[in-house]
Image: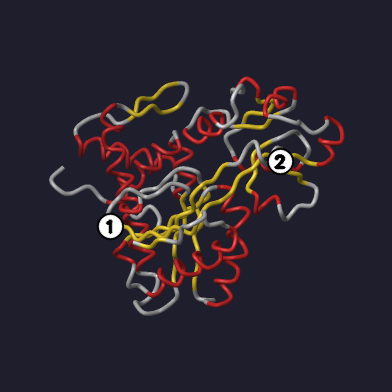
Amino acid sequence: MNTEPSWDLYRTFAAVLREGSLSAAARVLGLTQPSVARHIEALEQAVGGTLFLRSQRGLSPTDRALALKPYAEDMIATSAALLRTASANRGEIAGTVRITASEVVATEHLPPVLASLRRRHPRLSIELMASDAIDDLLQRRADIAIRMVEPTQQALVARKLGVLQLGLYAHRDYLDLRGIPGSIADLIDHDLIGADSNGNLSRAVLGALPGLDHANFALRVDNTVVQLAAIRAGFGIGICQVAIAARDAMLERILPDGFAFDLPLWIVMHEGLRSNERYRAVFDALVEGLGHGVSMPTGSSPVAR
């Protein structure tokens, strides 16, 4: 091809990669399946090689496609950020802001904060991505992030609000049936709720519970919202934020002197957005709203940089 491939080809390519089939990508993009197929064929001609292999299981990306994937994803993220930035004039608290937060924070903490923000700024729209994955703010996959780890990238504005305190909790119905464990060692005889994968947080939690491992979990699930729902349903004993449990009189803390865990809470955004009133208003609203649910360790104070 003598001309630069159309942006539509890259958008279609990214959709096929994400969805795994031409038909699924067509539904997401609002196109016909033949149109998606033509886009892929045109991009293959442009890059000079096959991007997908057809099989009974669907489409499998080739090594060439996987090499192109991060660039296509960056293009998608940049395009979305461009549209968000253009959704309002500079100086207006209006338009779209994209926030990423963990599943539990997005479910349990953010709704009232965002409701209050919307009442104050009715021309503001929020895109909320609930995920425990850490998105790259430098690539503008989100405008503002709420994180449980200290940001390491440069060119970010970050504010540490404090820590979210975690404890072991169970529903009173479960404790009436099974009794209250008197020590960490007693937990082995109970129905425990924990993560399925062996991630950093899971390893840290197990390190604070000597004698226990993944095999002791009666329910293993990585989705933290499901873990919380299981605790509330009386399935067994699991980890819950102290601030969340305090809202439910039926949840009782177990072994408060034997297990306590703190997660830092950070609000982060790209430094280039600092002077934009729209993003600053959302950043400040999150700092104010989420600050009520955290605790500061003794001798510390919030940090901004």
Q: Point out the residue furthest to the front here.
A: 299
Residue 138, image x and y in percent? 31, 53
| Type of amino acid at the residue the image marks with label 1 | Ala
Between circles 1 and 2, the one closer to the viewer is: 2
Circle 1 residue: 155
Q: Residue 115 or 65: which is nearer the viewer?
A: 115
Q: Label for residue 169?
A: 2
Q: Badge 2: few (under 14), some or many (20 or more) residues near its Cα, within 10 Å?
A: many
Asked which secondary structure carries label 1, the reply is: loop
Q: Residue 244 or 82: which is nearer the viewer?
A: 244
Q: Quadrant of the N terminus?
A: top left
Q: Residue at x 33, y 57 (%)?
A: 79
* 38 to 91, vertically: above or below: above
Q: Residue at x 79, y 33 (%)?
A: 180
Scheme by which the image is coloured: secondary structure
Looking at marks 1 and 2 on the same chain, the residue that comes earlier in the sequence is marked by 1
